[in-house]
Amino acid sequence: MSIARAAIVAAFTLSSSFAWAHVALAPPQAVPGQVWQGALRIGHGCDKSPTIRIEANLPTSFGTPKPLAKPGWTVNVSGNTIVWSGGVLPDDHFDEFVFRSAIAKDAPLGGIAIPVVQICEKGEHRWTEIAQSGQDPHALKSPAPVLKLVQQVGVSFQDGWLRATPKGAKVAGGFGLILNAGAADRLVSASFPTIAGKTEIHEMAVSNGMMTMRPLANGIEVPASGKIELKPGSFHLMLMDLKAPLIEGQSVEGTLVFEKAGPVQVRFPVRAIGAPGPMQEHKH
C-alpha cells in the first residue's frame, strides 16, 4: 500500500470512529435525482441502557423510504418517518438500520439533516440538533446525522448484498453495483476483515460449455461514466475463510479499494439463502 493510500485509510478510520460516538449515516454522501441506499449506525445505548426503538424523520426532499426487513424488529413507515421497534440492541453492541429512498432532483447541494430519536429501556437520545449558519457542528451535544448532497461521487457502490450461508460454509459471494461518475478506474482489492479471512475478486463464465470461475489478479476495470454489476454468474467478490455463518438480517462492513479513487467503505446486508438480490427484484 502506498503512503498516500495508507494516509487515506487512516484518516477514514479515525473519522469513522469519531462519528460512531453519535448516530451516523453510511455512506455519508448522495447525489440528487438518485436513489440513496444507506444506514443509520447506532453505536451505543442510553447510559448503558439498551436501545428498543429508533425513529428517523426524513426531509421532504426524500421520497417514500423503503426499509430493509430487520429480524427481531418491527418496521413501520408513515410518510417520511421510519420507526424500528420491538427489538433490543444492548448498549455494548452496535448495529445498522438500513433503508433506501429517492432524493429529489432539485434538492440543493450541501448537508441535509435527518433527525433521529433513539429510545432506550431507560432514557432516550434525541439526535435532532442542526447546526446553524456559521456554527461548528462539532459543538452540538446531540447532532442530527447529516447526509451530504454532492454533484457527483467519483466511484460509489450501491445495492450490495450477500446470501445467508449454511452452518460450516467457508465461502460466500458478494454482489452489487459499482457506479463511476469520473474517469476510468479499476477495482483492485476488497476486504471484509470482521467476517472473512480474505476476499478475492472473481469472474464466472462459460468456457467450452462448462461454467468456470477464476480469480482476477488485476481486478476489474470500471469504465469512465459507466458501471459494473457484480452478480451471480459473472463478476463478484469471493469472501473466503468465513469466521462465522452469514445470517439473514446481518450487515457486513468492508472496504473496496480502487486504483484511483482509493478505499471506499461498503455495507452488505445479508439476504435469505436463495434470494435473487435487490436488482433482480426490481426487474419484476
Image (tube, grey):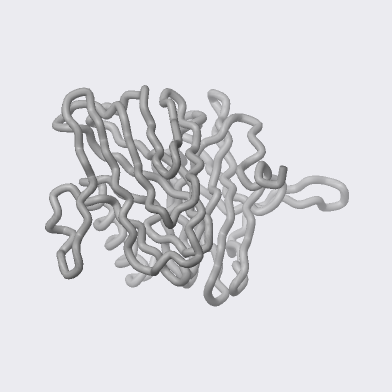
Q: Total marks drawn?
A: 0
User: Residue 87's image quarter?
Assistant: top left
Quadrant location, the N terminus: bottom left
Q: Position of residue 123 (x, y in %)?
A: 16, 29
User: Residue 228's x, y, as percent?
Assistant: 63, 61
Q: Quadrant of residue 121?
A: top left
Q: Is residue 148 left or right of residue 130?
A: right
State the image quarter where residue 77 is shown: top left
Task: Identify the residue shown where x is 46% and y is 43%.
Answer: 99
Q: Residue furthest bottom?
A: 183
Residue occupying the point 32% across, 24% down: 88
Against 213, residue 69 (above or below) is: above
* Horizontal and vertical percent position of residue 56: 35, 42
Relative image position of residue 212 (x, y in whole percent): 75, 48
Question: Seen in the image, is 152 located left or right of residue 2?
Answer: right
**Which residue is at the front of the view, 241 or 21?**
21
Q: Nearer the viewer, residue 93 or 207?
A: 93
Between 245 and 102, which is closer to the camera in this rendering? 102
Above/below status of 234 relative to 7: above
Is residue 186 shown left or right of residue 203?
left
Which quadrant of the figure contains the C terminus? top right
Q: Nearer the viewer, residue 210 or 73?
A: 73
Residue at the image position 59 percent from the left and 42 percent from the top: 173
The extreme right residue here reads 209
